[in-house]
């Protein structure tokens, strides 16, 4: 049987990306779990054309909410051609009834325990509509199928060492999608790190951890990093800011080749941090904790979200100076997106603040899908774009790069330079995030989805005994 795994994508910048840094791990992980008797391909529409005339028997679509309309369009096209279409990922998990209007079967949750069973059922002609994956220990995971990745991804070795996060941020689906916090055996992670069949030296050098919070279990991560020291790799990941309080961990990060850490700082306002569920973030500590990373030569990337209830146009625009003042090397700037399954979604739905007329494509981190408390949707969109242009102006990017010459080690300096050039050129050439306001590229899809789009009747995970998902659920902000 031939299986195509499609990691669905909708372009989010006016002219797309000049460089595609890293692939999601979802597709190549699921491909590695596919029994060898099946021929499997992984398609990333972000960098390659989707072949609707494929000879595959089964199409597996993995997507989050912002890409759901394109997933449904592809599903309709494949079904016209007689293909068996499976849906999974965060959106299918939280809107299973909706997804089943477009596909034959869905997987909700984590796929490891059900993917082989689903493929067997297809072979036997007994495919069920819904499969429910268990959250199993992360043992015996095979190395991802790096050989199936398109050549256009700059970094190709994505590795997962842990799954889950102990924090419950209001805008994040991870605690529900990946309950608990689990670690893979260190020897399995080291096996993936040592996979070196890549063309370019930097692809053999760099390890991109696709983890939501790699450093939660200190004994585990310290053990892993000690084993990584002799491998002489460069690596980067996501973590929480409390790592700055653990000098031993920071020293091990430096010695094992850490070149960058992403922090979800989100905001500088107390009210906005409370709205985000980020009470652990202390604004007064930001600068000192970033300095602790810089003392080890490690680049600090940080995410900031606009649109919390405490935000105003003025506070959003002020972020450009504030993130510079605390020493952020590479900012990631997005708009609050209330994904289904999060506290933010429930709050905005229950208060009638979701913009009912909009399709799921607005749920992509760069558009406004709700009515903010202290401004209009248009005000929020304008403030975010002004912040984006200011933060990635030539002057701002140059200032960050010049500062990094004295704070960062060689690998971290290269990454800081590349990322600032990447975003700086976008700003310079006006290749900005796309605004979908006033457009309706998926009108036929929206007409089918809209009547029940925010209905409470669409089952949540675990609401039915036969409900399921596909692949790893993490869609890392660092990998956008």
Image (tube, rainbow, N blue to C red):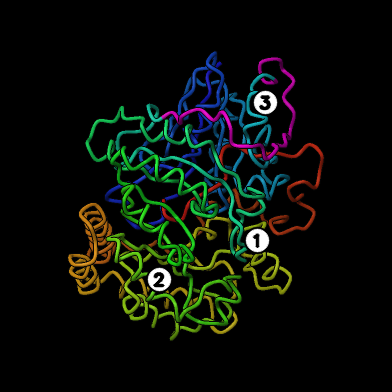
Among the 4 quarters of the image, the one containing residue 230? top left
15 displayed left or right of 468? left
Q: Earlier in the sequence, mark 2 or mark 3?
A: 3
Magenta segment includes 111: no
Check whether the beta carbons of the residues at disc 2 and disc 3 lie within 8 A of each other: no
Residue highlighted by disc 2: 289
Q: Is residue 274 above or below residue 397?
A: below
Reply above or below: 79 against 233.
above
Residue at left offset 40%, top offset 28%:
148
Q: Tell me, yes or no, whether the highlighted magenta stretch contains residue 143.
A: yes
Percent of width and height locating residue 175? 64, 54
The residues bearing labels 2 and 1 have C-alpha atoms spaced at a distance of 28 Å
Badge 2, how many Cα within 10 Å: few under 14, some, many 20+?
Answer: some
Q: Position of residue 388 (x, y in %)?
A: 35, 71
Whether residue 480 is visible to the viewer of this picture, yes or no, is: no
Region of the chain picked out in magenta, as a range? 121-145
Q: Secondary structure at mark 2?
A: helix
Identify the mark nearer the N-term, 1 or 3.
3
Mark 1 element type:
loop
Q: Which residue is mark 3?
A: 118
CA distance for labels 2 and 3: 47 Å
Instruction: Kindly identify which residue carries mark 1.
Output: 342
Query: Which of labels 2 and 3 is toward the front?
Result: 2
Given residues 253 and 85, the one toward you in this image is: 253
Q: Nearer the viewer, mark 2 or mark 1?
A: 2
* Secondary structure category for the residue under label 3: helix
């Amino acid at each position: 049987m031939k299986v195509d795994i499609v990691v669905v994508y909708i372009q989010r910048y006016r002219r797309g990306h000049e460089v595609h840094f890293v692939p999601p791990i979802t597709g190549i992980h699921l491909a590695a779990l596919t029994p060898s008797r099946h021929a499997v391909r992984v398609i990333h529409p972000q960098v390659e054309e989707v072949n609707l005339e494929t000879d595959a028997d089964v199409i597996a679509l993995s997507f989050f909410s912002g890409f759901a309309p394109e997933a449904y369009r592809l599903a309709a096209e494949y079904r016209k051609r007689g293909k068996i279409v499976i849906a999974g990922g965060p959106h299918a998990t939280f809107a299973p009834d909706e997804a089943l209007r477009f596909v034959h079967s869905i997987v909700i949750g984590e796929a490891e325990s059900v993917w082989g069973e689903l493929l067997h059922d297809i072979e036997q002609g007994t495919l069920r509509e819904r499969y429910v994956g268990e959250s199993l220990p992360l043992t015996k995971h095979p190395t991802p199928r790096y050989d199936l990745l398109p050549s256009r991804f700059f970094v190709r070795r994505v590795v997962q060492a842990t799954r889950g996060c102990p924090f419950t941020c209001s805008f994040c689906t991870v605690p529900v999608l990946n309950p608990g916090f689990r670690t893979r055996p260190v020897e399995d992670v080291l096996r993936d790190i040592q996979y070196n069949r890549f063309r370019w030296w930097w692809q053999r050098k760099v390890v991109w951890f696709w983890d939501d919070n790699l450093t939660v279990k200190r004994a585990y991560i310290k053990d892993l990093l000690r084993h990584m020291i002799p491998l002489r790799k460069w690596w980067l990941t996501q973590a929480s800011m409390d790592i700055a309080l653990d000098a031993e961990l920071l020293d091990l990060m430096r010695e094992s080749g850490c070149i960058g850490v992403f922090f979800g700082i989100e905001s500088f306002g107390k009210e906005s941090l409370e709205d985000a569920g980020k009470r652990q973030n202390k604004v007064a500590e930001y600068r000192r904790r970033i300095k602790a990373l810089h003392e080890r030569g490690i680049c600090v990337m940080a995410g900031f979200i606009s649109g919390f209830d405490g935000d105003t146009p003025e506070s959003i625009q002020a972020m450009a100076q504030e993130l510079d003042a605390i020493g952020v090397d590479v900012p990631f700037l997005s708009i609050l997106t209330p994904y289904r399954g999060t506290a933010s979604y429930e709050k905005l739905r229950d208060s009638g603040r979701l913009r009912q007329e909009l399709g799921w494509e607005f749920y992509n981190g760069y558009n406004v899908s709700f009515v903010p408390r202290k401004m209009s949707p248009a005000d929020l969109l304008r403030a975010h774009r002004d912040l984006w242009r200011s933060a990635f102006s030539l002057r701002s990017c140059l200032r960050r790069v010049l500062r990094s010459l004295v704070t960062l080690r060689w690998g971290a300096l290269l990454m800081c330079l590349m990322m600032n050039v990447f975003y700086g050129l976008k700003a310079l050439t006006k290749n900005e995030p796309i605004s979908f306001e006033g457009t309706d590229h998926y009108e036929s899809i929206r007409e089918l989805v809209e009547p029940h789009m925010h209905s409470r009747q669409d089952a949540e995970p675990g609401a039915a005994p036969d409900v399921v998902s596909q692949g790893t659920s993490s869609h890392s902000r660092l990998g956008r």
